[in-house]
């Protein structure tokens, strides 16, 4: 195994962990990724030339970059945002290209480099488990985590660390939400859904038991994170695959899934706190017994995009929130973001971003249809599972979620593997 590829795998695996170690707003790991991207730039150009999927992929990413650059530059010219935003968001868009290519590079070289990512993800889960209030070394692990966020000054970040310390010192395991080295359980959930998809693909592709073992570890960690959208997405992905995929004993799996679903629904209704203690979030639709405000948050987000279709500033969003609050009277509208990653496309790329994203999804589906039938089912379910999870949170692909780029690159990896196998058969 070559050292540069191992380093690249490590950098991709630790994404969003060392975010507080920065130079001019760019984290050290991202700077190193740019360095390797520059080093392999010739092979990047060669990949674009010889790989139709990757050429179209980069075409879409460049179009998104140009669109966001145009929107932000327009807002900066009229004095609604700082010019620094134009620069930082442009660099982020370019980093999506670099991140995608680096994963494709190591995945094409050898599956062992992808296994490095899988192993580091496993270590991240172990770190998270050791930090749980049930762990005898939870306090010590929290001190290690604090070192990662020694410079954090944002109120949400400080609040999350403060809550974790209070739960650990008080032994409140039922309310503790596993987050590992990430700043919050929501950040952990974005890592988990992508890692779960990667390992599920690898298990189906190579039938190695350690991938299955890590899927179990990830699912247990997801339960302890108490992120309901994450659990729902993972369950939907696995059960959906066994229900729809053309595999052996297909009829048996269908019957078992339907029976199990009815049984699970009965148990949930029979006991609201079946899975965990009475203070757990998992079996509750909303927190603190209050009605879920997310539909109003979604409506507010859509309302803001419709009223400011060519770019939204913070002040524009506050204005839209006040108008929606005056109509519905829910205070959550004033204090919370849209909590829907797909809606947030319009915040970062304007209303035109929705149109471009629609064609981006069509492009992915066109290539997914060319795969073997079991992988067609798998990747369609992955896309839908990701939409389930991100429909309740703010981050989204091409916004702030890098790990899912690796999942989408697996479409190309599988497509190339299939073509390679077909050539060998023809020969």
Image (cartoon, rainbow, N blue to C red):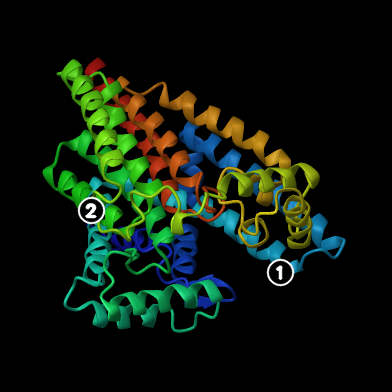
Q: Residues within 10 Å of mark 1 (few under 14, many from 20)?
A: few
Residue sitting at x 29%, y 34%: 265
Residue 280 position within the rendered picture, expressed as x and y whole percent measured from the top left? 32, 58
Label 2 to label 1: alpha-carbon separation: 41 Å
* 189 to 131, vertically: above or below: above
Secondary structure of residue under mark 2: helix
Taking 342 as reference, is 76 left or right?
right
Badges 2 and 1: C-beta atoms under 8 Å apart?
no
In the picture, the quarter occupied by the N terminus is: bottom left
Say which quarter of the image contains residue 258: top left
Residue 410 position within the rendered picture, expressed as x and y whole percent measured from the top left? 36, 39
How many numbered marks have been drawn onto this rendered protein structure?
Answer: 2
Specify whether residue 369 is in view: yes
Residue underneath mark 2: 220
Residue sitting at x 34%, y 59%: 13
Secondary structure of residue under mark 1: helix
Residue underneath mark 1: 84
* 246 to 315, vertically: above or below: above
In the picture, the quarter occupied by the C terminus is: top left
Residue 174 position within the rendered picture, expressed as x and y whole percent measured from the top left? 28, 64
Specify whether residue 115 is in view: no
Residue 180 position within the rendered picture, expressed as x and y whole percent measured from the top left? 32, 67
Residue sitting at x 26%, y 68%: 173
Q: Residues within 10 Å of mark 2 (few under 14, many from 20)?
A: some
Q: Which is more toward the observer, 212 or 138?
A: 138
Q: Which is more toward the observer, 363 or 387?
A: 387
Taking 143 as reference, is 26 left or right?
right
């Amino acid at each position: 195994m070559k050292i540069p590829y191992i380093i690249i795998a490590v950098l991709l695996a630790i994404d969003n962990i060392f975010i507080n170690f920065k130079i001019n707003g760019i984290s050290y790991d991202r700077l190193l990724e740019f360095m390797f991207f520059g080093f392999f730039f010739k092979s990047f150009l060669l990949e674009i030339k010889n790989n139709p999927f990757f050429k179209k992929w980069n075409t879409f990413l460049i179009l998104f970059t140009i669109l966001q650059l145009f929107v932000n530059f327009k807002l900066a010219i009229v004095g609604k945002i700082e010019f620094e935003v134009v620069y930082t968001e442009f660099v982020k868009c370019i980093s999506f290209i670099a991140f995608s290519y680096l994963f494709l590079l190591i995945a094409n070289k050898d599956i062992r480099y992808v296994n490095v990512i899988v192993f580091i993800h496993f270590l991240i889960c172990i770190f998270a488990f050791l930090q749980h209030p049930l762990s005898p070394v939870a306090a010590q692990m929290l001190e290690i985590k604090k070192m990662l966020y020694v410079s954090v000054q944002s109120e949400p970040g400080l609040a999350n660390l403060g809550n974790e310390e209070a739960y650990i010192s008080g032994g409140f395991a039922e309310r503790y939400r596993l987050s590992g080295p990430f700043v919050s359980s929501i950040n952990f959930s974005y890592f988990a859904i992508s890692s779960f998809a990667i390992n599920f693909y690898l298990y189906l592709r190579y039938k190695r038991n350690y991938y299955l073992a890590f899927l179990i570890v990830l699912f247990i960690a997801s339960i302890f994170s108490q992120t309901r959208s994450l659990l729902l997405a993972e369950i939907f992905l696995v059960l959906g695959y066994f229900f729809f995929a053309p595999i052996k004993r297909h009829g048996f799996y269908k019957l078992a899934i339907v029976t199990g679903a009815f049984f699970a629904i009965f148990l949930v209704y029979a006991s609201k706190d079946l899975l965990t203690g009475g203070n757990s979030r998992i079996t509750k639709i909303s927190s603190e017994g209050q009605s879920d405000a997310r539909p109003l948050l979604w409506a507010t987000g859509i309302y803001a995009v419709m009223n400011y279709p060519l770019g939204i500033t913070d002040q524009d969003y506050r204005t839209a929130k006040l108008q929606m609050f005056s109509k519905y009277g829910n205070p959550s509208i004033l204090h919370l973001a849209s909590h829907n990653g797909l809606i947030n496309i319009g915040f970062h790329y304007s209303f035109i971003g929705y149109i471009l994203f629609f064609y981006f999804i069509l492009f992915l589906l066109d290539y997914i249809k060319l795969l073997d039938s079991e992988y067609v089912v798998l990747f369609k379910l992955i896309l839908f599972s990701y939409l389930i999870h991100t429909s309740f949170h703010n981050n989204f692909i091409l916004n702030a979620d890098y790990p899912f780029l690796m999942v989408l690159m697996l479409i190309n990896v599988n497509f190339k593997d299939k073509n390679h196998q077909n050539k060998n058969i023809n020969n």
